[in-house]
Amino acid sequence: MRTALNLASAVVYYLSITPTPLSARTMQQKFEQACGAEIEKLCAAVKTDADQLKGCMMAKRTQVSPACMKLFDASE
């Protein structure tokens, strides 16, 4: 679970969702709920690099749930 939190934090950083701590925390929670298990399963080797994480998830998009992919697509 710790890795999922680190990965979610990296995604939040990548998305530059930092206008307020609350919105960043909310976005992190959304990623944890929608993507945490999939990140662990599909891209566990990518620890904290947000660009690599996004690339990994995009490369495996056919294996990623629609809810999770929607968050990644919104970051483009």
Image (cartoon, helix red, strand yellow):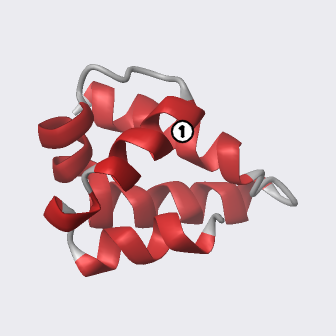
In the image, taking residue 62 as reference, residue 73 lies left or right, namely right
In the image, taking residue 67 as reference, residue 54 lies left or right, namely right
Q: In what quadrant of the picture does the C terminus appear?
A: bottom right
Q: Which residue is mark 1?
A: 9
Could you say whether the residue bearing mark 1 is in a helix, strand or loop? helix
Q: In what quadrant of the picture does the N terminus appear?
A: top left
* Residue placed most toward the observer, 25 or 41: 41
Mark 1 crowdedness (10 Å alpha carbons): few <14, some 14-19, many ≥20? many
Q: Position of residue 43 (x, y in %)?
A: 26, 34
What amino acid is labelled 1 in the image?
Answer: Ser
Rendered residue at 19%/51% (across/down): 38
Count of all numbered marks drawn on residues in the image: 1
Quadrant of the image occupied by residue 56? top left
Q: Is residue 54 above or below residue 53?
A: below
Rendered residue at 27%/80% (across/down): 66
Q: Is residue 73 above or below residue 43?
A: below
Q: Position of residue 28 (x, y in %)?
A: 51, 54
Q: Position of residue 69 (x, y in %)?
A: 37, 70
Q: Residue furthest front?
A: 59
Rendered residue at 52%/71% (across/down): 73
In the image, taking residue 69 as reference, residue 39 lies left or right, namely left
* Residue placed most toward the observer, 1 or 76: 76
* Residue placed most toward the observer, 71 or 59: 59
In the image, taking residue 71 as reference, residue 2 lies left or right, namely left
Q: Is residue 10 above or below residue 45?
A: below
Quadrant of the image occupied by residue 27? bottom right
Quadrant of the image occupied by residue 61? bottom left
